[in-house]
Image (spheres, coloured by chain):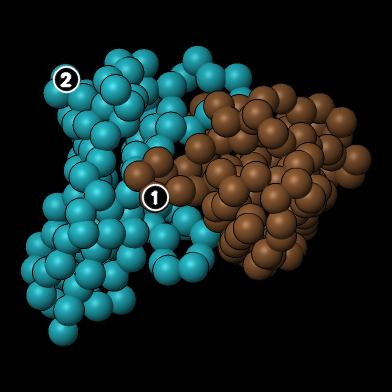
Chain colours: A brown, B cyan
Amino acid sequence: DAGITQSPRHKVTETGTPVTLRCHQTENHRYMYWYRQDPGHGLRLIHYSYGVKDTDKGEVSDGYSVSRSKTEDFLLTLESATSSQTSVYFCAISPSGGAGETQYFGPGTRLLVL
Amino acid sequence: QKEVEQDPGPLSVPEGAIVSLNCTYSNSAFQYFMWYRQYSRKGPELLMYTYSSGNKEDGRFTAQVDKSSKYISLFIRDSQPSDSATYLCAMRSTGTSYGKLTFGQGTILTVHP
């Protein structure tokens, strides 16, 4: 988890409320990713960013939006939280998104939507 | 059908056992293969990384890739209680523009003393 922090680490919210999760990195890596992890599904990509203000959708992006105004910060917003978005959310980073690179993961945020 | 299939276990072995973890995949374009280890309530951490077919060894860990069978394995020798974790395989093709990783579901491993 070195160089990557996520906040909050735990959150309980109610259906219909907006929620924002923050990922902060100190590695100056260009690529940042948001995943969710659910039993039986492994890690699934929600959105990713390849630079400041440059973002794109992953495989499970419905109901989520992202923003990146600084290299070090990548925000994930649940516009109107639903119970199906209860999950563990991980941020990951990689230097340039190249095929030969690995991704490094943050500690995760546990989100419960009631 | 998922692109990557991994037996979720759980797998329970005695200390000192040899552990074999496996993933199968359907996308023949996958060229980069990774194993991540994830301790309870932590983020995944990279354990092994291999390119194309062959073996790679790092201490007690050996990663094998058989592209002809679309099958990868992770072997843990002399398993220790500290190896108890979820192990995730991940794969990537050379054609991806943003480093897209495809993950297996993860195998839960417990090594008991």
Which residue was labeled with disc 2?
A: B68
Amino acid marked by disc 2: Ser
Number of numbered callouts drawn: 2
Q: Which residue is mark 1?
A: A39
- Mark 2 lies on a secondary structure that is loop
Which numbered dot is residue A77? Answer: none
The residue depicted at 50 percent of the width and 15 percent of the height is: B95
Q: Are marks 1 and 2 on the same chain?
A: no
Query: At 81% across and 27% down in the image, what residue appears?
Result: A54
Can the viewer see residue A106 in this picture? no
Q: Amino acid at mark 1?
A: Pro
B30 above or below A25? above
The location of residue B44, given as percent across then percent down, is 47, 56
- Kindly identify the residue that appears in the image at 64 percent across and 55 percent down: A113
For mark 2, does the 10 Å Cα neighbourhood hold few (<14), some (14 to 19), or many (20 or more) residues?
few
Q: Which image quadrant is residue A80 in?
A: top right
Q: Is residue B98 left or right of residue B113?
A: right
Decide if residue A99 is on the left or right side of residue B4: right
- Label 2 resides on the chain identified as B
Q: Is residue A80 above or below residue A96?
A: below
